[in-house]
Structure formats: C-alpha cells, structure tokens
Amino acid sequence: MKHSCILIGAPVDSGQRRAGCLMGPAAYRVAGLGATLTALGHGVEDRGDVALPPLREVSGSNAAVHDLAETVGWTEALSATVQSALSDGGFPVVMGGDHSLALGSVAGAAAHAHAVGRPLFLLWLDAHSDFHTPHTTTSGNLHGTPVAYIAGREGFEAFPPFPAPLPPRNICLFGIRSVDPEEHAALLDHEIEINDMRVLDEFGIVAPLRSFLDKVREADGMLHVSLDVDFLDPSIAPAVGTTVPGGTTFREAHLVMELLHESGLVTSLDLVELNPFLDERGRTAKMMVDLVGSLMGRKVFDRPTRSF
C-alpha cells in the first residue's frame, strides 16, 4: 500500500533539559527521509517545521516543571497540524523533537479518529513508560508525561482536554526498561499492555507485537506509532540524552518495523528524541531513516551495503 506521506517538523526542546532535539527535523531531512520514502513509491509532502504559537499564560502546582507554557503551545500546534494532515488523507510523519511532542501528535490523531468513528491505538516504542503527570514528575521534564495524558490521567489542567482519551487497553508499551516507582504504581491501576524487555527476552519480538496488532485489526482501529531513539540500544543509536542500556538490537528493531509494515495498520508516526549534537557522523539519524524505510515497505534484500 502506497501512502501520501506528510512530513511535519517538530523542533521541540522544551520537554527536557538537554538542548539539541530541536535540530532533529533538519537531521532527518539531511539523512534523506524524504528521498527514502519517494524511492519506495510513496508520495511525499514536506510541510516544513511547525511554529510555536504566541504563548498564553499557564500555571501549575509543581515547581519542578519547566517550560510549561512552551510545551502547552507545542501541544496545541501539533495537535492541529496532525489532525489536518490526517483529514487530508495523508500519513503524517512527525520529525522531532523530544517526546513531549506526542502530547500534541497523538491528540491530533485521536481527534481525527473520533471524527471518523474509528478507535485509535498507540504503540509506544520507548525505553521509558512516560506515565508521569505534571503533578507527579520530580524531574520536571514533560517528555515523561505523554502516555498519562493520552490515557486520561488527571493532572493536565494546563493542557487542552485530550480529545477522546484512549482506553488503556488500546495502548501498548513495547521495549520499556526504565520506570519510576510512581509510574509503576499508576500503571498497575490501568490495563495498559506492557511488553518490557523481560517480556521480549522471554517470548521474543514477534508474538507480543502480533497479539497487539490483532487487537487493532479486530477493532478496525487506526494505529499511531511513537518511536523513541532510546527504544534502540545506545551502542547502535548514541544520539539521545536518555540512554538506557539493554535496548533493541539493529535486527530486532527492523523486525518490528517490517511486522508493522506487513500489518498495514499504521496510520501515523512520531520520530522522537534524536539529538544530532550527540550523534556520530549522523549514524543515529541514518538508522532512524532506515527504520522508517522498513516500516514503509523496504525489505532486507533492498538494503544496500554502506559505511557510516
């Protein structure tokens, strides 16, 4: 199946404290994301980078939270942009930017899914569960809150109400290996599907992923995939400020992408937490582009040999 891919730059750096993710959209363009999609036969429209709108005054009770107004602004702008791209019949690819951009991208996908009468599902490919709220975070980094927002947890009074919060059973955390105690306790109260690295080590990549995809298919759902660089092991993807050892290998990550392609279920995509300032000659950016290629239909025997 060929898509009309709409590239959306999200130079978001407000969700964490290590500067550099705002350069992510440019890095994906330089690494050839558009050309990769075109070579696979997809239409490509680059709508440029989303601009941060004029900030409105917002406040929160947790003094640790930083850049709240900026993150709320990005959430509103990206929600509208992703919803518009989906309404236009496109396949939005949001090039980040830190993971707080998913507060907006998934809100836009949820608004569109609600408008067309289909359930939205979320596959969260990440080392972290990102299940804090602005009230519970101790770091103050809002890139650790999107899944809680998407699942309808309380504590997001400063943000627009999430359109049609996803039932927790529609959310799958895949590959996680770093969860704070408060997040762990909250996750126990929700029916979110959790496939941490212990599960993937014990049962492999294929069975848990296919089980979740079967649920999406049976519900005629739309599927948003949010791919964090730290889903990958830092030995192969160093350009991220939140490294956690024990991530997926090159082969495992490509297998996930190929299974997603074969399912035909993915309708929107985030690429997040790429910090080009921490990269090695564009190595991580190129790998992320290669993973998108696999998600969009490139097979192993199509992949040329190259040096970094």
Image (tube, grey):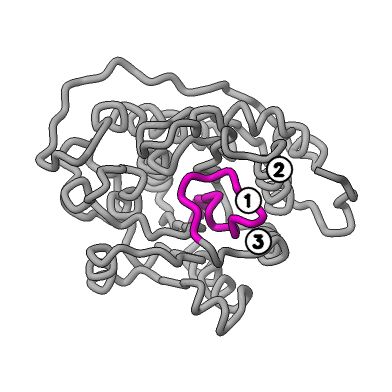
Q: Secondary structure at mark 2?
A: helix
235 in magenta: yes
Q: Which residue is mark 1?
A: 237
Question: Seen in the image, is 305 located left or right of residue 11?
Answer: right
- Please name the amino acid that badge 1 sits on: Ala
What number of labels is visible?
Answer: 3
Residue occupying the point 31% across, 49% down: 145
Contact? badges 2 and 1 (CB < 8 Å): yes
Which residue is more in the foreground, 252 or 220?
Answer: 252
Q: Which residues are magenta?
A: 221-244
268 in magenta: no
Question: Seen in the image, is 22 located left or right of residue 298?
Answer: left
Which residue is more in the foreground, 214 or 285?
Answer: 285
Q: Secondary structure at mark 1?
A: loop
Question: Seen in the image, is 156 located left or right of residue 236?
Answer: left
Q: Secondary structure at mark 3?
A: helix
Q: Is residue 29 above or below residue 161?
A: above
Which residue is more in the foreground, 251 or 165?
Answer: 251
Q: Which residue is mark 2?
A: 283
Judge the density around disc 3: few (<14), some (14-19), many (≥20) Cα neighbours within 10 Å: some
Rendered image quadrant of residue 54: top left
* Residue 244: % across, % down: 49, 59
* Residue 153: % across, % down: 21, 55
Q: Which residue is mark 3?
A: 253
Q: Is residue 211 above or below residue 126?
A: below
Q: Residue furthest left?
A: 61
Q: Is residue 95 above or below residue 220?
A: above
